[in-house]
Image: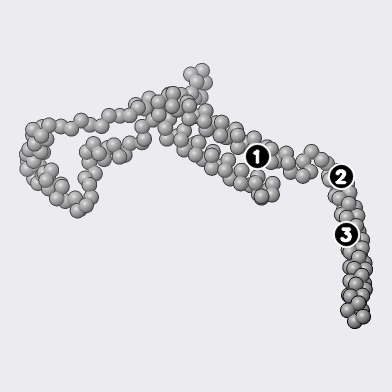
Amino acid sequence: MADILTQLQTCLDQLATQFYATLCYLSTYHDNAPATPPPDVPDAMPPLAKIPKNQPSAAPMPAGAVQAQQAQAQAQGQAQGSPAVTGQQQQQQQPEGQAPTTGPAAAAADQPPRPDSPRTFAYRQRELARDLIIKEQQIEYLIGRLPGIGSSEAEQEARIRELEGELRQVEAERERKARELRLLGRKLEVVLGAVERGVYARDKN
């Protein structure tokens, strides 16, 4: 398991990612309503023109109307001395494998995503806010577990000296146990040697 500082750094990175994802969602799927300054502020900018929601793409024109427009454009081009370009010539001038850049499909591709409904937008706002609060509580919990939080510098130094004294005592106890272990090992070797000599002496008799 990672230490507290590593967990805290991971949570901070995750919080930054959640902030970025939240801003991206709010700026992409809002209802396109412009912010209007309060009317009682004299230095405020004038209200912005309301941006229409989901502008409908142009409806397809009948074939007869298209041909009439092309004929009119051709007649105007001949009158001005410049050849008119028909729809078929425009398609031929397009590179192979590339879709035309005009028409309803191109207009729909340039438009931003469709905004969420007010109910869905509010629900997702609450979900994103709840995730941010949970992550912030995790960060506060990890910060609270850091050693030395809530203690002054003098108290921390006193605690370090106390821990150093405990460490010396534990080290002295370890050395004492190691000496006892070596002594018991030598006693065991003597006992095993006596048992071995007794067994051999019995076999000889």
Residue 139 - label? 1
Q: Going 50% across and 36% down the picture, which residue do you hit?
A: 22
Left or right of 94 on screen, residue 48: right
Q: Quick one: label 3 or label 2, which is nearer the N terminus?
A: 2
Q: Residues within 10 Å of mark 3 (few under 14, many from 20)?
A: few
Give the image quarter of residue 133: top right
Q: Which residue is mark 3?
A: 174
Where is residue 158? Give x, y as percent.
88, 46
Q: Residues within 10 Å of mark 1 (few under 14, many from 20)?
A: some
The residue under label 1 is which amino acid type? Ile
Judge whether residue 84 can be spotted in this image. yes
Where is residue 113? Give x, y as percent.
36, 35
Mark 3 in CB contact with mark 2 (< 8 angstroms): no
157 and 176: which is toward the camera: 176
State the scheme by which the image is colored.
one colour
The residue under label 2 is which amino acid type? Ala
Looking at the rendered structure, the secondary structure element under dot 2 is helix
Residue 36 - label? none
Residue, far front: 205
Residue, far bottom: 204
Q: Which residue is mark 2?
A: 154
Q: Going 60% across and 37% down the picture, which residue do you hit?
A: 135
Q: Going 23% across and 50% down the picture, which residue do you hit?
A: 98
